Image: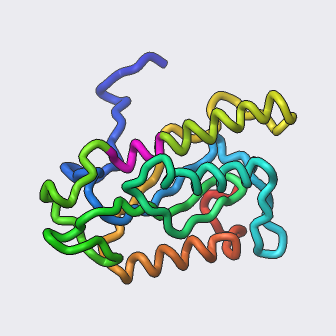
Amino acid sequence: MKFNSAIHHRKSIRLKNYDYSQAGLYFITVCIEGRHCLFGHIPNDSMILNDAGKLIASQWNELDNRFPSIALHEYVVMPNHFHGIIEFVGKSLCGYPSSVGAIPCGCPSSRNPDLTIGDVVGAFKSLSTNEYIQNVKQNNWQPFAGKLWQRNYYEHIIRNEEEYLKIAEYIQNNPLKWQEDTYHI
């Protein structure tokens, strides 16, 4: 079907007019294209990572070396998706150090001017895809059709400590709820 802007219009899932380079905490979810289970399995409510899943965890844990202005918090590699919390470190309230629960003010002193959440997620997806492809060729990992990751990602701006604690608990307990998970196919 030919593209028709009157009926084929993508709506951005990003918060309109929000500066995603601001210091603060972000919850992200990235899914495998087609939701194929490539990163391991969950017997008895516990995630067992295969080599590909270990690669994803390793790429995640290296991000703060690549981007010194971020800090990584809770994360989980699931069979066909990934959840994590990224903190953009800096001044989240004018003149006050970053802390969980602080809402970014948007003033210049609270920003990471050259880095956005999209840059970090994009690097994570790109680096993990390239390494996964190498392992498909060299170590006979399960190939994927088209792309490893879905085109976009889900993100949520964490606004306070209560939200942070709920999301951190959700991430930690995600394998326990795999049978009910919306990403489980």
Name, please, the residue furthest toward the top. Answer: 2
Left or right for 144, reference 43: left
Residue drawn at x 44%, y 16% as measured from the top left: 2
Q: Quadrant of the C terminus?
A: bottom right
Residue drawn at x 24%, y 71% as measured from the top left: 103
Q: Quadrant of residue 87?
A: bottom left
Q: Quadrant of residue 78?
A: bottom right
117 drawn magenta? yes
Count the marks.
Answer: 0
Q: Quadrant of residue 136?
A: top right
Give the image location of residue 80, x and y in percent.
Answer: 68, 52
Q: Is the residue 181 above or below the residue 149 in the image?
A: below
Left or right for 5, reference 140: left
Q: Is the residue 171 above or below the residue 142 in the image?
A: below
Residue segment shown in magenta = 115-122
Give the image location of residue 25, x and y in percent.
Answer: 37, 65
Left or right for 42, reference 2: right
Residue drawn at x 40%, y 42% as measured from the top left: 119
User: According to the image, what is the colour scheme of the structure?
Assistant: rainbow
Residue drawn at x 63%, y 65% as measured from the top left: 181
28 drawn magenta? no
Most common secondary structure along the magenta stretch: helix
Give the image location of residue 157, x and y in percent.
Answer: 34, 63
Closest to the observer, 164 or 184: 164
